[in-house]
Image: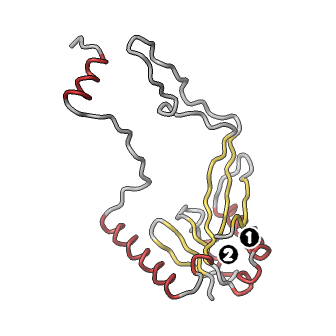
Amino acid sequence: MNIHKSLVLRILKEDLGKRRLCAHFILHSLTPEQREDQTTSCQDIIAMADAGKNFFNKIITGDETWCFACDPKTKRQSSEWVGETSPWPKKLKFQRSRIKIMLIIFFNSQGIVHKEFVPEGKTINAEFYEGVMDHLLKCIHWVCPAAFCSRDFFLLHDNMPAHKAASVCQFLTQKTVTLQIYPCQTIFCSPS
């Protein structure tokens, strides 16, 4: 149509009243059944919180994350306002950081309970995660000795396959940590 881009943008913004928005990323698109299960699970957690004093102080939660040596800007973060005749700013495509390591961290309402870096080239599988659980239980014993001895804590994390593997569940059962599965998350409950 041989219309300059800036004219198209002006028509969109001024004449049609449009604006450009970036999409928000969501982790899952849940089915109605999954939403119902999640609602029921949340109600169960609320009931457990209402029943026990200091319930939220008993939660130990954790997750894995990638740590990079640098955090390069996204295309959106590096955008600039320029004049109509100015050339478009250029940005190199995402370059992988040469230093990238996985961090597993667990914390409670008082702070970090245990953190552990995954060795380079190691995969988080059931065998590796069982070792992480063993280290975590030792750290709980050191950081929260009363909760460890009475098993008065809840271990909350996501539903990754290694987290819910049979050998990990068996290990936690042997350590008198009972298991409850919630949709989109796993909660290990120690009997109080």
Q: Amino acid at mark 2?
A: Phe
Residue 104 position, x and y percent, is: 67, 57
Q: Earlier in the sequence, mark 1 or mark 2?
A: 1
Q: Quadrant of residue 151?
A: bottom right
Q: Total marks drawn?
A: 2
Query: What mark, if any, has residue 190 been given in the picture?
Result: none
Q: Amino acid at mark 1?
A: Asp
**Residue appearing at x 47%, y 33% in the figure:** 76
Q: Secondary structure at mark 1?
A: helix
Label 1 crowding class (10 Å Cα cut-off): few <14, some 14-19, many 20+?
A: some
Name the residue furthest right.
Answer: 142
**Residue appearing at x 55%, y 87% in the figure:** 52
Q: Is residue 13 above or below residue 69?
A: above
Q: Is residue 22 above or below residue 79?
A: below
Locate the N terminus by quadrant: top left
Residue 139 position, x and y percent, is: 76, 70
Q: Secondary structure at mark 2?
A: helix
Query: What mark, if any, has residue 134 been given in the picture?
Result: 1
Residues tagged 1 and 2 counted as in contact (Cβ below 8 A): yes
Mark 2 = which residue?
171
Residue 37 position, x and y percent, is: 38, 72
Query: Who is closer to the viewer here, 28 or 1?
Result: 1
Locate the C terminus by quadrant: bottom right
Q: Relative to 38, is 67 on the left or the right?
A: right
Residue 62 position, x and y percent, is: 62, 63
Q: Which colouring convention does the figure follow?
A: secondary structure
